[in-house]
Amino acid sequence: STGRNPFGFFGGVNVISMIRDGKIRAQGPFAHAILAGTAGASILPYMISLWFEKKKLMSYLGIGSALIIVYSSGSSGPIMTFGFGMIAMLCWYCRGYLAQIRMMIFVTLIVLEIVMESHVWYLIARIDLTGSSTGYHRAQLITSAIEHLNEWWLVGTTYTRHWMATGVSWSNDHTDITNHYLLTGVNGGLPSMLLFISLIVIGFKNIGSALKRCNSISTQVQIWAIGASLFSHTATFISIAYFDQTIIFFYLTLALASSCNNFQFSNSIVPNLYDKNTV
C-alpha cells in the first residue's frame, strides 16, 4: 500500500519496494519479489492438507496468506508455482492414473517438439500473467546453455556473460541464470546437475512408497501435499534460481519426502517424539 518495505529498515533488503510497469513488487524479507512469492506459493499444498485434518480455520488462513503473498509479489513466477501446487493437489482425485498422465505429458512434449518451429521449452516465452514477464529470456537461456555445453559440462564454469545479450549488475562475468537446474550445472557441471535431479527423483519415490504403506486417508493427503509441494518447486526451478533463504523451503520439502517413508504411520506423518518406540 505504501511502496515501502518495513523489513528494509532492519537491513538486507530494500526499503523502497521494486516497481515494474507501474506495479509494486513486494519482497518482504526475501532477496527478490519473485522469491518471496515463490516461498508463499510453495506452502499452498500443506495449507490445503490441513483442511483434511479438520483444521479448517488454519487451512483458510494459510491459503489466504499464500494468495496475498503471491499477489503482492507482482510476479508471474509465483502465480505459476501456485498453479502447479493446485494442479498437483487436484491430481489426488485421479491418483490411480498418474502413470498414464505422466506418459501422456511425455508424449505431448515429444509431439510439440516435432511440430513446433522452435524448441518446446519456448512455451515458457508465451506465459505472461502479469504483463511484464521475461519468459523469452528464460527460454533462450536454456538454448544458450545447450549451445555452450562444452564450457560447463565437466566441472561448471566461472564465465557465462557471453551466453546472453544482457548481464547482471553484481558481476561482469555472468548473465542472469534464472534456472536452478542450470545454476547447479554452472556451479558444479553436469554431474552436479544430475545428482541434484536424482535427489528430487528419490524424493518422489519415497513419497510414492509411503503412500502405498499408509491406510489413513488424512495421512495420505498430508504425504500427497509433500509431493505436491516438491512438484511445485521442481517445475518452478525451470524459471527461477533460488539464491536466498527460499532454498530452505525446498530443503525442508526434500527432508520430509526422504523421512516420511520411515515413519510408523498412525494418524499423522509427524512422529511422536515422546513415544519411546518412535525414538
Image (cartoon, rainbow, N blue to C red):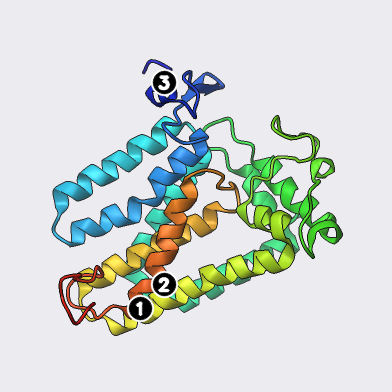
Marks 2 and 3, how far apart at CA: 38 Å
Q: Nearer the viewer, mark 2 or mark 3?
A: 3
* Residue 182 x %, y %: 68, 55
**Residue type (three-letter) at the residue carrying disc 2:** Ser
Is there CB contact under 8 Å for labels 2 and 1? Answer: yes
Look at the picture and state if 231 lies above or below 5: below
- The disc at residue 9 is 3
User: Taking 205 as reference, is 265 left or right?
Assistant: left
Is there CB contact under 8 Å for labels 3 and 1? Answer: no
The residue sitting at 34% across, 73% down in the picture is 260
- The disc at residue 67 is none
**Residue type (three-letter) at the residue carrying disc 1:** Asn
Q: Secondary structure at mark 1?
A: helix
Marks 3 and 1, how far apart at CA: 43 Å
Dividing the picture into quadrants, the one containing residue 186 is bottom right
The residue indicated by pointer 1 is: 261
Of the two numbered discs 2 and 3 on the same chain, state the one appearing first in sequence: 3
* Residue 258 x %, y %: 41, 72
Q: Secondary structure at mark 2?
A: helix
Which of these two is toward me, 8 or 128? 8
Near mark 3 (Cα within 10 A), the count class, few <14, some 14-19 or many ≥20, is: few
User: Taking 275 as reference, is 83 left or right?
Assistant: right
* Residue 150 x %, y %: 86, 61
Q: Secondary structure at mark 3?
A: helix
Q: Quadrant of the C terminus?
A: bottom left
Marks 2 and 1, how far apart at CA: 7 Å
Look at the picture and state if 156 lies above or below 108: above
**Residue type (three-letter) at the residue carrying disc 3:** Phe
The residue indicated by pointer 2 is: 258
